[in-house]
Amino acid sequence: MAAWNPKMEFMPREELERLQSKLLKALVHRMYDYSPFYRERMDAAKVHPDQIRTSKDVVKLPFMYKKDLRELEPERLFLASNRELVRYHASSGTTGHPTIVGYTQNDVNNWTESVARALASAGIGQDDILQVAYTYGLFTGGLGLHYGAERLGCTVVPASTGNSERQLDMIKRLGVTAIACTPSYLMHLGEVAEKKGIDFKRDTKLRLGILGAEPWSEGMRERMREWLGVKGINIYGTSELSGPLWCECAEQKGMHVWSDQTLIEIIDPDTGEQLGPGEKGELVVTMLLKEAVPIVRYRTGDISTIDVEGCPCGRDHPRLGRITGRVDDMFIIRGINVFPSQVEYVLMSNPELGNEFQIVVDRRGALDEMLVRVELKPESFQDNVAKLESLKTRIHERLKNVLSVSAEVELLEPGSLPRFEGKAKRVIDKRKIQ
């Protein structure tokens, strides 16, 4: 079985647990000694660093939430000085306020190491050519895969997103063997190729897809294999942790989470109690080596499972199951996290719109689409088509600016949408993801 760092990747479980305990203790002491913010958090939770003796003691530490990263100023969260920081990344942002994460050189190196191991375990090596079709920039997907693949020694095509015909041209002319993108985009490329008379199996060398940033199903994986001849590999990461980090190995029995860098838990999202292997709950992550922004017991909101049994590939690092849902109402479309609150923020800032709206997410062909249906206020409901079209255009542009993804807009007469006595059902997701 191929590996990038055999010593760490095939370390026995007992040694991994001892290393995890050592790293966790060091992390907690550093946070407590050098950060007033984290010291306040631990004091409030009535836990002292001396109480953290093994990795199992992680349950004594307080949770960290996305709002901590979103609402607190960087100087409250960062443990690194400006001189130590080498890079920033940011999420698309809820209500237009992005989550900003800083990186030291060691943070970038550890992130790169994680991705290099992941790609090697999936079967990518120095003879491969990887086309990275994730966005480059503040979004972590493009640069994360790029650095990891270069560290591994394979050739990288930094294609970024869009321009499907050019993407196909690069795949054909350069003999690309693997592509990193969202699963829906790979399927879209298949449709574009078919229209141009290109047969993936006959006309390209593409054999692997490193696919993530949106939910996808085993059914899509199988269709991808049969139709395109591409083996789909599931990858996971979030901008708060370091972007893409872990993916399935060639055995495809879950995503290996490197225990020398990360400690993961699955908890009951309602009680916060830690759950056992195989039990479905919310993924909680502690990044053991992060320097710039310590991430301790971060509640991702993603629903998954952990498998701690040894993998047939020979690695004892725990495996994260497929993400099957969210504990909040966030949904992912074309690789972008979207919260209904973001949509509401845009709509409610427009005085011509009413209070009721609905978001419909569907998949046309291989690509996700979003429709925002919103009621007009009675005084705004009129027969002037030109004014209504102008209003739709303004809302469309505003949504695109805030969400970083396009949405169709439908204006409705007052009272058109259903009302709810309890919590309103704002999102109708028609995508079939099993």
Image (cartoon, rainbow, N blue to C red):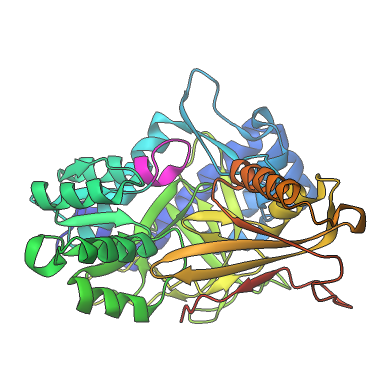
Magenta region includes residue 350: no
Task: Please identify the quarter of the rendering in which residue 16 is found.
Answer: bottom left
Residue 32 shows in the view: yes
Q: Residue at x 16, y 52 (%)?
A: 171
The location of residue 271, given as percent across then percent down, is 73, 73
Q: Is residue 234 above or below residue 136?
A: below
The location of residue 60, given as percent across then percent down, is 67, 59
Magenta region includes residue 142: yes
Q: Residue at x 39, y 34 (%)?
A: 106
Taking the image as shown, residue 114 lies to the left or right of residue 32, namely left
Q: Is residue 66 above or below residue 223?
A: above
Task: Please identify the quarter of the rendering in which residue 308 is found.
Answer: bottom left
Most foreground residue, 25 or 108: 108
Count of numbered tags? 0
Taking the image as shown, residue 224 lies to the left or right of residue 279, namely left
| Residue furthest right in the image | 379
Residue 11 shows in the view: no
Taking the image as shown, residue 70 lies to the left or right of residue 171, namely right
The location of residue 203, given as percent across then percent down, is 8, 62
Most foreground residue, 361 or 294: 361
Query: Which part of the image, by quadrant, shows the N terminus?
Result: bottom left
Q: Residue at x 21, y 40 (%)?
A: 150
Most foreground residue, 107 or 34: 107
- Per the rendered image, the range of residues in magenta is 135-143
Q: Residue at x 47, y 70 (%)?
A: 363
